Image: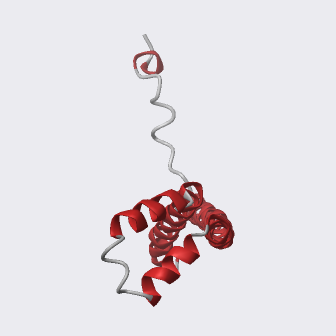
Amino acid sequence: MSANSQNPFGAVFPLKAPESLRGSVLARVAREQKRSFAMRMAISLSVEIVSVAAVAGSLSYIAQSLTASGMYGYLGLIFSDGTGLLGYSKELVLSLVEATPVLAVAGIMAAALFFGWSTLRLVRQSRSVSLYA
């Protein structure tokens, strides 16, 4: 039996890789990490812009819904005349609950959560920028 049949990797391991190959591989890995980081940051920034637009859109939608439902009138009554509120507090609370635009409130809460999540993700990814400096 020959030495190569007992150790099939015997011909590979004695070879030494040139030092320039190691530097070239490390430079390529670093370049790929920088490219990957830049891509993740670009995607995160675009998600952040979309989330800001969603919050702005939901704010305008809730303002329109509050006007259409008449809730502004009830809120104005609360802040303008405090004397009559005690006698009719139950009716006022029920009217406020009925006039609350639930879909608009749910939309703004979802948009705010999306904004918070995307901001948190952007901050976490930007902390790793020191690794690639």
Q: Which residue occupies 57% across, 76% down?
A: 72
Q: Position of residue 74 (x, y in %)?
A: 51, 74
Which residue is at the far left?
86
Q: Quadrant of residue 45?
A: bottom right
- Asked where in the image residue 44 lies, by quadrant, the reply is bottom right
Residue 15, above or below 95: above
Q: Quadrant of the N terminus?
A: top left
Residue at image location 37% in from the left, 81% down from the top: 84
Residue 97 visible in the displayed image: yes
Which of the 4 image quadrants contains residue 53?
Answer: bottom right
Which residue: 37% across, 86% down? 82
Q: Is residue 5 left or right of residue 63?
A: left
Residue 98 locus on image (x, y percent):
50, 57
Q: Which one is in front, 80 or 60?
A: 80
Q: Residue furthest bottom?
A: 80
Q: Residue at x 54, y 67 (%)?
A: 115
Q: Residue 9 appears at what percent x and percent y?
A: 46, 28
Q: Answer whether residue 54 is visible to the viewer in this image.
A: no
